[in-house]
Amino acid sequence: MLRKLAVASITIALIGGMAFAALTLLRPEISPAYDFTVEPSPWKFAGALPLLEVPEPSGIAYYADRDSFFIVDDGGPSRPSALYEFILVAETHPEYGEVTGTKVKGKLELGRDLEGVTVNSSNGLLYIAEEWYDFVYEVDPNGPRHLRTFRLQHEQGGKTIAERGGDGIEGIAFRPMKGKPLGGIFYLANQNDPTCVIVCELPETGGAVGGDPALIKVTDVIESEQINLGDIMWHPETGTLWLSHAWMNLLQIVNPDTKETVKWESLPGAAQEGTTLDGDGRFWIAQDTGGVAVYER
């Protein structure tokens, strides 16, 4: 991993800065109905990369053993949704000298509206959340290659977990846990109807490509404020979930065992569709408006 991240293009950085400023001015004020204190963000802007191969980043995950990033694009009318793997590389700019750039190592077109990606540290596989059908895909990072498909049931045990249609799954996170299938549990961020975190387990068998999707077992639901939940990330050092509310630029830190919100912080950047921490503890944000930005404490 490169220790210092330089902006790959000064022009791109200036355009991104203006776009962020515009979005900041346009975003609504926090409604008085939400009675909580928002702390200033401890993260400071360190750089940005355009990542032109991924037009609309919607989820990102750092893969420590590969020292690479996996990022998903939610696709469009003329562009299939896809998973990409990229690494950071040193490049020489004719005017600015050595800068940090990106190199795409792999791509997999998959699903219809990919919104989140996470790394299962227990088995080394990727798990990708799709909003259109409320699917979760299991993917081998080598290739990458689609292995299995899982489907979320909206009603379980006579109770509606989440409404069909509308704004569904926007993010996915994995938490290692002994004694659980696939070595841990998964958290799905449901954007609206209702805004919540769905706690679930994925089966060890079934769902192979070409067959019917295997059913996801929901074990719990964590309610959240109705503020356009956009992504979710497991933070192992603190044992907390980081929930990004993109429209309001808020980061909600939650203790999943007590279901209590530890604190609210301002979330840096704009259109924050994906979040991850790299091996150096830097905070990466994939922006739906294009490109990725990195922040340091």
Image (spheres, rainbow, N blue to C red):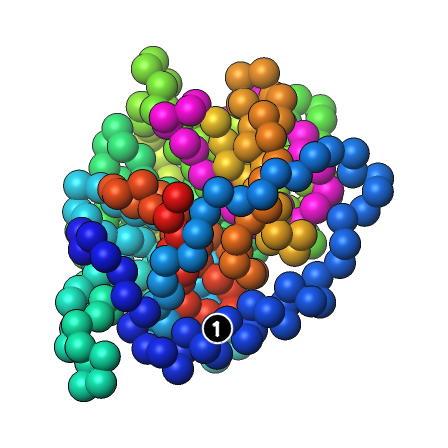
Please give the name of the residue rendered at 51% of the width and 64% of the height, measured from the top-left corner: 288
Q: Is residue 165 left or right of residue 127?
A: right
Span colored in magenta: 216-239
Q: In which quarter of the image is residue 279?
A: top left
The answer to whether 271 is drawn above or below residue 19 in the figure is above
Tell which of 22 and 233 is nearer to you: 22
Residue 145 painted magenta = no
Residue at the bottom extreme of this rendering:
94
Secondary structure under the numbered disc 1 in the rendered image: helix
Q: Report the side of 264 relative to 43 (left or right).
A: right
Residue 114 position in % (x across, y down): 46, 57
How far from the left and from the top, in percent, is residue 198?
A: 57, 32
* 269 in relation to 257, above or below: below
Residue 229 magenta-highlighted:
yes
Q: Which amino acid does label 1 sit on?
A: Gly
Q: Residue at x 50, y 31 (%)?
A: 241
Vertical side of 204 occupied by 131: above or below:
below
Q: Position of residue 229 (x, y in %)?
A: 62, 46
The residue that appears at 63% across and 72% down in the rendered structure is: 22
Does residue 202 appear in the picture of this structure? Answer: no
Whether residue 11 is visible to the viewer of this picture, yes or no, is yes
Relative to residue 111, is residue 122 drawn left or right?
left
Residue shown at 75% from the left, 58% from the top: 28
Disc 1 residue crowd, few under 14, some 14–19, many 20+, Cα 10 Å? many
Residue in front for this viewpoint, 132 or 124: 124
Q: Badge 1 is on which residue?
A: 16
Q: Position of residue 173 (x, y in %)?
A: 43, 37
